[in-house]
Structures are given as structure tokens and as C-alpha cells.
Amino acid sequence: MRLPDPAPIALSPPAPTAARSAGLALALLTSLNLFNFVDRYVLAGVQPLVAREFSASDTQMGTLSTAFFLTYMIAAPLTGWLGDRLPRKPLIVAGALLWSAATLLTATVHSYRSLLLRHAAVGIGEATFSIFAPALLADYYPEAERNRVLSVFYLCIPVGAALGYIAGGVLGPPLGWRAPFYLTALPGVLIAAAFSAWTHEPQRGSADRLAPTFDRATLRGLARNPGYWLASLGMALMVFSMGGISVWMPTFFFRYGGYSLPASTELLGGITVVDGILGTLAGGWLAQIWLRRNHRALFLISAWSALLTIPGALLAFFGPRPALAPAVLAAEFFLFLNTGPLNAAIVNAVAAPVRSTAIAINLFLIHALGDAFSPRLIGMVSDRSSLRVGLGVTVIALAFSTATLLAGSRFAPVLGAEGGASAGLEPAS
């Protein structure tokens, strides 16, 4: 008697393959993000050399950053609209190539006007990447994993900024200010090519577990999404503080701490790198543990981040001189705790159909309400009072950020034990 043929076995990609694919995408996007910030900050490392060659005033050199943020903010809404309608992978590659080309072309400019146009072009390329990369990562990882993933992805902010400063400061004096731009432009091109060749784009929304409700999945509904708006406003208030502190603290160390200007920048650079790495990793780790027991954890760890920063900031701005460096070390550590959790809260607040647009609006808001004007406001207060009082404005912003994020925690989505959703964005009981 002939036995029946065995039933065919359905073949499907094993889980490790999917995990490796997601891990490779995270590694390459994180590497691109590193050079995103290296290329953004390398100009600051050679700024005195550039100003001397072009006979540029401090106002003109400051205008370069203004041009960057203006194009960054203007490009964001259109970029987000494209990201919700077109494949993100080629757009990410195009953005990386654009900012890398603009960085390379900096080495060839011979006028201030050309330099201004080039720096503005960097803003367009970086806005493209900063919107699409988190949205794409959200399609590789479910909601419960995004805090961990984005903590790794955004770890590059302090490290990339420091490497940009170092590349300019070390290579610029002996080799000329153009040399660092040749060096830092190439890695972005190579990593973008590897990302294009070795990764695939997952189906939009394939990792989402939360229900795509009206307020999470439509542009009209986004206007009535309190979790998203409160998280964005809380982040804008933090960026207000971060932007103002990063611009004025070297001057504060020089003016009130008794440090020389080179010593103050070296000390602050070291503090930022150490706190950026440790604070970002610690915040992501604590939020991931807390999230298993409390669905509000992403908002709450961010609120605590702002609140715990305040004592160190007050001690640094108004305390005795010996306490300045230790106070800044403590304050910056707590300030970086929110990096992964708060970005994850914003990504989780919306569904895949409008995620790129939502991230674009968020980027516009946090810069328009944050670091686009906080350094100038602090300077105005300082001119009328003192730099201590001017920097004290950032403490007020941190207090409002704490209250805003605590209010936003009421609308945190409820995640199941394995990243599934048991509710949409509804007020928690």
C-alpha cells in the first residue's frame, strides 16, 4: 500500500533572519546619524579659521546656524508629506548624499555667500534623514521596542557633535580649515551605499500593534491627538533649554568659572560626551524596565529627566564657583535621560500612515519654539541683567516641560506584554 505524500511544509523566513535584518538597518542608520551630526558640527570646530579667511563678523558666522535651522524647518513639512507617500529607503539615501555633497563642497567655497548657501543645503539633507530614519525604524520594531532602539539611534547626537568639534579643531590648524570637510564627507556616502545595497524596506506599519484610530492615523485626527502634542511641546521646552545652555555655557565658564576659553570648551565637550552616552543609555534602560509595569513610562521618565535637571542647573548658574563643573556634570546626565523615551513616545503616538508627517511637524515645532530663538533670548536677558539670570530662563522652561509631560502621560497608549496594544490614545484611568 502506497503511503500518501507528505503535506507540503510552508516555508517562512525564520525570526532570527528578520531580527538580523532589523539589526543591520539599525546599525547602518545609527552610523549615518553619527555622521549627520559630525557634518553638522565640523564647521564649529574651524569657525575662527573660516571667519579669518572671509573676514566674517560674529553676526555673519552666527547667521550660518540660522540659515541651517531655517532650511531645516522649512524643508521638514514637505519632507514629511513625501515620506508618508513614497518609499523611505531611497529618500534616506538621497538625504545622506545631499548633506555629504554639501559638506564636500564646503571645501571648495571661496566666499561667505557660497558658504551660507552650502550650510543651508546641509539643513535640507539632514531634515530629510531625521524624519525618515525614525519612521523607517518604527516599521522594523514594535512599539514596546522603540524606546530601546531610538535610545541607540540618538546616542549619536553628543558623540557626533563632539567628533565634529574634534575633527575641525585637530585637522584645521595644521592642514587648513578645508581638510576636515574632505574627511567627514566620505563616510556618509559609503554608509548610504551600504544601506541601499544591504537592507530592505519593510511594509509600512508592519510592526505596529496599536490600532490605527482616527486620531493616530489621519492628518485631521492628528490635530486632536493630545498625547502627540503634549509630548512635542514638552520636547520643545527641553530643546529650548538645551539649545540655550549649549551656546552660552562656554561663555559662562569663562566669565564666572575662571576658566580660559579653550579649557572651558574642552571641559564642556568632555562632559557632554560622557553624559550624552551614559545618560541616553541609562534613560533608555530605565524606561524599558518601567514600561513593563507602567504604560506611562516613556512620558514619566522624560518628565523626571526635566525635573531632576533643575537642581544641578540652579547650582551651576547661581552656586559657588567650585560647584560649577560637578553641577553641570549632574545636570547634563539627567537632561539626556529623556532622549530615547521621549522620541519613542512621539513615534508611538501616531500610526504609520501619518508618521513621517508627524515627525516632520515635531521637528519644526521643537526648533521653532526651542533652540531657534532661546540663545538670543538668553543674550537679551543677560544684556539687561546678567548671564546668570539669562540662563535661569532655561530652568523655567524645564519646569514647564515637566508639567507638560506629566499631563501628556495621561494619554500614553497601553501596550501589551509583548508589544501589543490594549487601547488607543485614550486618557488613562
Image (cartoon, rainbow, N blue to C red):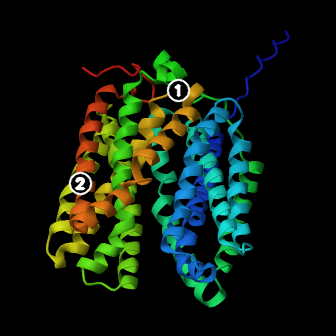
Compared to residue 69, the image places residue 9 above or below, namely above
Q: Residue at x 71, y 43 (%)?
A: 91
Quarter of the image for the N terminus: give it: top right
Q: Residue furthest front?
A: 384
Closer to the camera in the image, 104 or 287: 104
Q: Name the image quarter holding residue 330.
A: bottom left
Depth check: 202 or 185 in front? 185
Q: Tag 1, which secondary structure?
A: loop
* Residue 1 or residue 412, whichever sits in front: 412
Image quadrant holding the C terminus, namely top left
- How far is the residue under mark 1 from the one under mark 2? 33 Å
Q: Residue furthest right?
A: 2
Q: Mark 1: which amino acid?
A: Ala
Q: Quadrant of residue 170?
A: bottom right
Instruction: Residue under label 2, please give it.
Output: 395
- Decide: few, some or many residues near mark 1? Use Cα within 10 Å; few <14, some 14-19, many ≥20: many
Q: Which residue is mark 1?
A: 351
Q: Earlier in the sequence, mark 1 or mark 2?
A: 1
